Image (cartoon, rainbow, N blue to C red):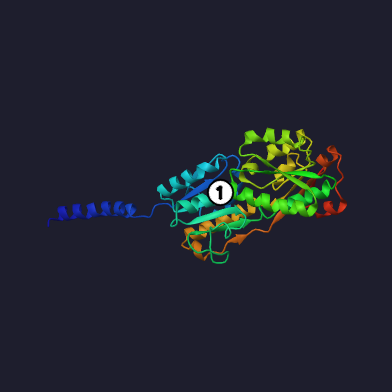
Amino acid sequence: MRRREFIALVGGVAVAWPLAARTQQPAMPVIGFLGVASAEGYRPKVAAFLQGLEESGYVEGRNVAVEYRWAEGRVDQLQALAADLVRSQVYLIAAASTPAALAAKTATTNIPIVFEMAGDPVRLGLIASLDRPGGNVTGVANLSIEVTPKLLQLLHEVVPNARVLALLVNPANLTVAETESREAQLAAHTLGVDLQILNASTERDFDAVFANLSPLRAGGLVIAPDPLFSSWSKRLGELTVGHAVPAIYSRPDFAAAGGLLSYGADDRYTYHLAGFYTGRILKGEKPADLPVQQSTKVEFVINLKTAKALGLIIPVPLQGRADRMIE
């Protein structure tokens, strides 16, 4: 072989090898983020999720990509969105809410799923047990459903003379709504009050809900935890002010917007945990071996300004139990 031909051959290998090596590099993993509400409503939760993901070693756009799918409050769209993520061959699905987790579970038994949800994932059939989930699903469960009777109890302490209270649920989120209604009815029976169930499956239903409170002679409103209501919690807080209704919800921004009381899990904390768990799975751990995290961190907020406007006196012992009071 001539020297010039040998140099050309070596030069060709030197150029071709890096190109071949680049084509063999693993692609950036893609996470599918499945949300039941809107991107705007979930902005703080997504930020907390990405922070947890970063703490596990993954930064969006640097070494991991995220594809977002939003149902815009239409639970019936979640199944199609989950199937779309499966077709896209994402590495993992982050399911934001109970209905999103159920839709993802139906869509795939192979792709790992990390949920942030309310209620008992064992009872809902998502996992085998909290300690050993089995299968392709794990995540973080907060106390949102279990806290609904507590919401009723706290509101009753502020309006003890009310003989009728109302509970707002989202019938589109049927599994959760039925559980919330059943648990709340049991609590209402214990408290000796009549509980009227009101429904809202979109933001457009809110005005009718508040218009119905007066004919029902409801002395207060409990808003059951739901992704739709969380996305519109500020709007709901404003409506309670406009209609002069003593009300309680699980989100602190509800109280900040004028709602009388809020009591619930810190979802920024739970989404942070879900993000961290996602990173662990990206590193090679299996969902089946990761115990479901259970959030017990709650915050109780009282809006004293609203209480004064409604002519209500917040019992001193109840004030002593508050984490924060708005004056």
Instruction: Write down the quadrant of residue 38 in the picture.
Output: top right
The image position of residue 64, as x and y in percent, is: 47, 51
Which residue: 83% across, 42% down?
Answer: 307
Q: Is residue 193 left or right of residue 104?
A: right
Which of the pair 219/82 is nearer the observer?
219
- Please state, as top left, top right, bottom left or bottom right, where the N terminus lies in the image: bottom left
- Look at the image and tell me whether residue 193 can be seen: yes
Along the line of sight, which residue is nearer the eye, 267 or 10? 267
Decide if residue 287 is on the left or right side of residue 201: left
**In which quadrant of the rendered view does residue 232 lie?**
top right
| Quadrant location of the C terminus in the rendered image | top right
Say few, some or many: other residues with alpha carbon within 10 Å of mark 1 (under 14 / 14 to 19 / 20 or more): many
Q: Position of residue 199 (x, y in %)?
A: 65, 40
Count of numbered marks: 1
User: Would residue 46 appear left or right of 155 to someone viewing this image?
Assistant: left
Q: Residue at x 50, y 54 (%)?
A: 58
| 320 sits to left or right of 94 | right
Residue at the outermost left position: 1
Front in this rendered view, residue 98 or 238: 98
Query: Where does residue 317 sit, x and y in percent of width and height?
Result: 86, 54
User: Which residue is found at the position 80% from the left and 49% from the top?
Assistant: 156
Q: Which amino acid does label 1 sit on?
A: Pro
Name which residue lies at 58% across and 64% down: 130
Which type of secondary structure does the marked residue at label 1 adopt? Answer: helix
Residue position for label 1? 99
Q: Residue 202: percent from the left, percent from the top? A: 61, 37
Q: In this view, does 96 lie above or below 238?
A: below
Q: Which of 42 and 200 is in front in this view?
A: 200
**Would residue 300 be seen by someone viewing this image from the given angle?**
no
